[in-house]
Amino acid sequence: MKETPGRILSLDVFRGLTIAGMILVNCPGNDNPYPFLAHAEWDGWTFADLIFPAFLVIMGVSLALSLGRRVEKGEKPFDVLGQAFRRSAIIFALGLVVSAVMVPRLGVFRIPGVLQRIAICNFVCAYLFLKTKPRTQILAALGVVTLYSLLMLLVPVPGFGAGELTPDGNLASYVDRLVFGDHMWTESHDPEGVISTLPAIATTLLGVFAGSWMRAKMRPDKKFQDLFLAGAISVALGVVCSRYIPINKNLWSSSFTLFTGGIAVCGLAVCHFVIEVLGLRAWGKPFEVFGRNALASYFLSEFFYGIQEFIHLPGRDENIKEWLTAAAFGSLGEPNAALAYSLCFLAFCLAVMTAFYRKKVFIKI
């Protein structure tokens, strides 16, 4: 596939940084990585918890840029929306493939997942961008966050009551158990469940708003200032909301939505400033490689990593990943070994995607 004209390098680089972070977080060499590379068990946040929201924000930015250009060229919104639906369907199907490889518990096929959530957010936000005005989109973002918060705080869960935000007692987990049964990440809840996708849509809409701002004709330094200020305000609102509803990735709480979405917008603004304003571009080339083939990079990393976890060595109680980590890095201690393996795996993924990049093969799902 030929290169798409009019791309924004800073967006590709920031997307690539997010993919690299996602690989480091999702593909450790053992079960004892450094705490900042592991998700918070429940309330609170770590570096790992910032990755997925950043990817959704970036997806929203890309939607505003790409769909906006296509509509301006005269393409019919119905045709553009149809392509968005097909793309989302393919992403959802790929998510099911990843679920088939990344088995959380023996004999369990997980129905929800990261790619599945990405697919839903992609289509819903594409629809809103094409069919509604910015004011409606803002109201939709505020509405879903408010609605979700009210549901979580006011709707009683059998056996627990209303406002319970524990892993077993919250409404989102209860709905997921009703809908999916055992086909979840854990027996009690799933971090990519049904109603917790509502605030994830709001996260993506934050990216749509940022993308619409990036499309505006103004100086690059002015764009940086406005984006960074907007992101900082969102972070502050998230901190304020956390006094009432904790920052929690598993629940994708309203405070988590505002806090992590704001950090992502600030990160994009900084990347835009460094590359587009200061002109420092060479450092971003490895991340551009990932960013140009983001979903392909994610899918291939999950697939190859899952295969290593799935295949066990004959006569030994360890899989290929465990054997490689112990053989190559076992003397470093568990956290260092986990990081060393994930860095090597990241380099492997970069080598594969660099081959695609040099051949100008950009897989646009």
Image (cartoon, rainbow, N blue to C red):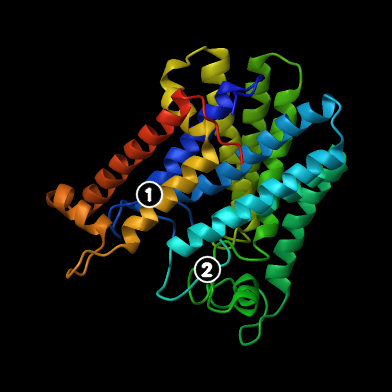
Classify residue 319 as left or right of residue 18: left
Q: Percent from the top left, x then y, of residue 171?
A: 65, 73
Q: Which residue is mark 2?
A: 110
Q: Tell me the SS state at disc 1.
A: helix
> Which quadrant holds the N terminus?
top right
Can you say whether 348 is above or below 46 in the image? above
Q: Mark 1, residues whose alpha carbon is within 10 Å: few (<14), some, or many (≥20)?
A: few
Q: CA distance from mark 2 to mark 1?
A: 26 Å
Q: Which residue is depicted at the point 55% across and 60% down? A: 96
Q: Percent from the top left, x then y, of residue 274?
A: 51, 19
> Which residue type does callout 1 highlight?
Phe
Can you say whether 199 is above or below 104 in the image? above
Can you say whether 186 is above or below 274 in the image? below
The answer to which image quadrant residue 12 occupies is top right
Can you say whether 352 is above or below 96 in the image? above
> Which quadrant holds the C terminus?
top right
Residue 25 versus residue 259: which sits nearer the camera? 25
Residue 300 versus residue 263: which sits nearer the camera? 300
Q: Percent from the top left, x then y, of residue 300?
A: 44, 46
Q: How many numbered dots are placed on residues in this image?
A: 2
Q: Percent from the top left, x then y, of residue 172?
A: 63, 70
Q: Which residue is depicted at the point 56% across and 54% down? A: 94
Q: Mark 2, residues whose alpha carbon is within 10 Å: few (<14), some, or many (≥20)?
A: many
Q: Earlier in the sequence, mark 2 or mark 1?
A: 1
> Which residue type does callout 2 highlight?
Arg
Classify residue 182 as left or right of residue 24: right
Q: Is residue 201 visible?
A: yes
Q: Which residue is mark 1?
A: 36
Q: Which residue is depicted at the point 51% across and 41% down? A: 296
The answer to which image quadrant residue 150 occupies is bottom right
